[in-house]
Image (cartoon, rainbow, N blue to C red):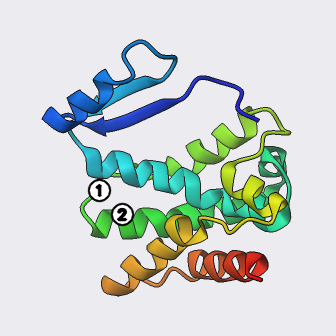
Amino acid sequence: MQRRSGSLTVPNDPAGTAFAALFAHSPIDTILTDDWQSAAWRKLAINCAGAVNALTLQPSGIARDAEAAELMRALIRECIAVGRAEGATLPDDLPDSIVEGYRNSPPDSINSIHADRLAGRPTEADARNGVIARLGARHGIDAPLNRMADVVLRKATSR
């Protein structure tokens, strides 16, 4: 269930400005950024942690469980290592701030990958977790948790 207005972060360039103008009179906030790479990797860090929800079939409240929260942080730490290798600037406290965001959201909130899994649809695990493992391998960085999340989620929804 969507509980708030959406937001989009786009590059601060002519194409991004034109794209943002499309949403000028809508409830969608658009944010222009001069560091698109870092913004994209921050969003990927949030999304990769959502694999815990999809794997456990538990909503955001699962982040209040210490073991689940640590798994989320570990997925995010792998994402940070790969993102930094790709040139993103990501803070060391990102895992804690993302888990805190999950903990502060309504405990029954369901993210899109969890919703897809509940509906029996293919998930976006490759775009959320698989990409971290693949890009990590290119840099000699192992991302075993993201690789596992990708494989298990893809297998769980394949028919």
Q: Which residue is mark 1?
A: 88
Q: Amino acid at mark 1?
A: Ala
- Tell me the quarter of the image containing the C terminus: bottom right
Q: Which residue is mark 2?
A: 83
Q: Are marks 2 and 1 in contact (CB under 8 Å)?
A: yes
Residue 71 position, x and y percent, is 70, 65
Q: Which mark is residue 79?
A: none
Local secondary structure at mark 1: loop
Residue 104, relative to residue 141: is it above or below? above
Residue 70 position, x and y percent, is 70, 61
Look at the image and tell me whether residue 13 can be seen.
Answer: no
- Tell me the quarter of the image containing the N terminus: top right
Query: In this image, 70 relative to 35: left or right?
Result: right
Query: In this image, 125 relative to 105: left or right?
Result: left
Residue 23, relative to residue 52: is it above or below? above
Residue at 66% of width from left, 66% of height from top? 123
